Amino acid sequence: MATAHRPVSTVDTARAPGTARTSDREGTAGSMETAAPRDTAAARGTAATADTADATAADRAADAKAADQAADAATLQAAFNAAVAADERIEPRDWMPDAYRSTLVRQIAQHAHSEIIGMQPEANWITRAPSLRRKAILMAKVQDEAGHGLYLYSAAETLGASRDDLLDKLHSGRQKYSSIFNYPTLTWADVGAIGWLVDGAAITNQVPLCRCSYGPYARAMVRVCKEESFHQRQGYELLLALSRGTEAQHAMAQDAVDRWWWPSLMMFGPPDAESSHSEQSMTWKIKRHSNDELRQRFVDICVPQAESLGLTLPDPDLKWNEERGQHDFGAIDWSEFWSVLKGNGPCNEQRMTQRRRAHEEGAWVREAAAAHAARHSERERATGDSERAIENSERAAEDSEREEATA
Amino acid sequence: MTTHSASTSPSAATSAPASSTAAALPLGDDALVLSHRLGEWAGHAPVLEEEVALANIALDLLGQARVLLSLVGDEDELAYLREERAFRNVQLVEQPNGDFAHTIARQLYFSTYQHLMYGQLAASDSPLAPLAAKAVKEVAYHQDHAEQWTLRLGDGTAESHERMQRGLDALWRFTGELFEPVAGLDLDREALRERWTAMVTAVIGKATLTVPEGPQSGAWTAGAGREGLHTEPFGRMLAEMQHLHRSHPGASW
């Protein structure tokens, strides 16, 4: 667990997306994630030390005697519970239960991973986009997803996780991404279906997260949701153009909706009765609505939109239930969901292979940036007194070497 | 489907209003083609920040291409319905991405040229001046991005140094074309070449790399891209880019 070695109340590695991080080495590289693994570990150690010192000042309880600590822990827990109950935000420096921290790291990381894996099925169509306008929209969308990945990894970093570590967990299969991206984009209309349905489902899931109890995540989600709703409208508009286009275009749109509808419903996760993390997350106000509630909300939103699109949702059992004031819909094939989750989806292997390859093929670039940044910061530090002293002693050593050589 | 030969032929540049915007086609093609190549990086970049940066540059270029091509005709007809031989971009921008260093070398050469070219154009009385004035600001960022990466890779590790040098060397022979005359573009080409050489030389030197020594154009002909003569990878690039659009004649998207 990334947080295990961090002092619980101390973490504040928060940075605005795209700005430099706190340690010298990484800071000089600008917005680049430059550090090779060993450097990151070193930087993390430095940051942790700094944080510890910081926390000693900030957290007076740490100075108290051991006998007081149990009482303090209870006080902190009570303060945390009260803040959550009062709908206040928990911030990086606030005390929080370990399980709350680890749940958030897991959820935010999975969300970040979904953004970067989610780039693949759409990037698949950038080079074939059928008009320059659509190409610009699609490129901007895929770029936004990379940006969302950046905000979210940053939000996870405020909890003491590191991006490198989270990426390792993605690459080694220890952390997941949304299963929806294990489905292929077979035609241009899939780009529209992803925008309308997948982004639509994501928004339904994510809008409540803007009120999540953890501040940095909630704030990241506000920005993410604004952009996602833009994407959703663009997807809808793309499908509308196809639906009202030629016969072949209309068929392409219908086919895409037929393939993406059920997987989109699965995006809300298993039925409430089978959802393992839901209850605790609801208490913590990380999650505010159950999977089934959100799924129902999504279906109710989509039905009239499908009608406006002139497309059919592939569910013969889908109908308005006057009594409930909601739509009834057919049974979801959860065996497919679990099978895709376990790695048997059409694209699991392909997505992970491409992700790992991009990471591995980029290793030399990241190493170069780290080496350059390290050299650069060494030069800057060389103006400092202690560095000058080292330089002088090195020069003395060189001089003596030279003397030896000439002797 | 409308025909496109009239609007894309260089001879269309002979009439008075067209001649003033004749350069829009070659410059638009440069931006269109390089944008496409950069778009191929999506999902493959070495680090997340570069996913954002490369897409950003691609989007700027696509925006420029759309404005420029729209001065000539319908942007989609021009992009999707012309054959390879009707494109007027320089060969440099159509070169495949290669590794990240190769892409950065292409960016360094081209963005330095484009920055200087738009700078001159912005100060001229060309009808393209307003567009150039806007684009020059975007391209200043592209140039800076390429320069920073040339420095990092050149003065990074032994491997990155070697790769960066290889990229610079491989693309050097496509740089001569940047200074060939372009119909409708009244530039001080000598000044352009001098400043380009000075800037590129300075960056390469600072990056502890060596300015390539070979000729700046191939044996075949300098300026070939502007005449519609391209390299083999370009045809494949267009095949991919145009396939869907051409598969649905007359459809709108």
Image (cartoon, grey):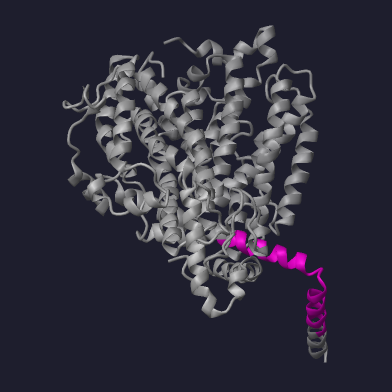
> Which sits in the foreground, B97 or A260?
A260
> Which sits in the foreground, A278 or A18?
A278
Q: In this view, does A308 lie to the left or right of A24?
A: left
- Residue A370 magenta: yes
Q: Quadrant of the C terminus of chain A?
A: bottom right
Q: How many marks?
A: 0
Picture coordinates of residue A116, whole percent (x, y): 44, 47
Q: Is residue B234 something that shows in the picture?
A: no
The magenta segment is A367-396
Picture coordinates of residue B126, whole percent (x, y): 75, 18
Picture coordinates of residue B184, whole percent (x, y): 70, 19
Majority secondary structure in the magenta region: helix
Q: Is residue A102 something that shows in the picture?
A: yes
- Residue B125 magenta: no
Q: In which quarter of the image is the N terminus of chain A?
A: bottom left
**Residue occupying image coordinates x 43% and y 39%:** A208
Up the image or down, B163 lies above or below B9; here it is below
Q: In this view, does A200 lie to the left or right of B221?
A: left
Toward which corner of the image does residue B142 lie, by quadrant? top right
Up the image or down, A43 lies above or below B120; here it is below
> Which sits in the foreground, A250 or B159?
A250
The residue positioned farthest toward the bottom in the image shown: A407
Toward which corner of the image does residue B190 lie, by quadrant? top right
> Which sits in the foreground, A2 or A69?
A69
Picture coordinates of residue A250, whole percent (x, y): 30, 18
Q: In this view, does A392 lie to the left or right of A175?
A: right
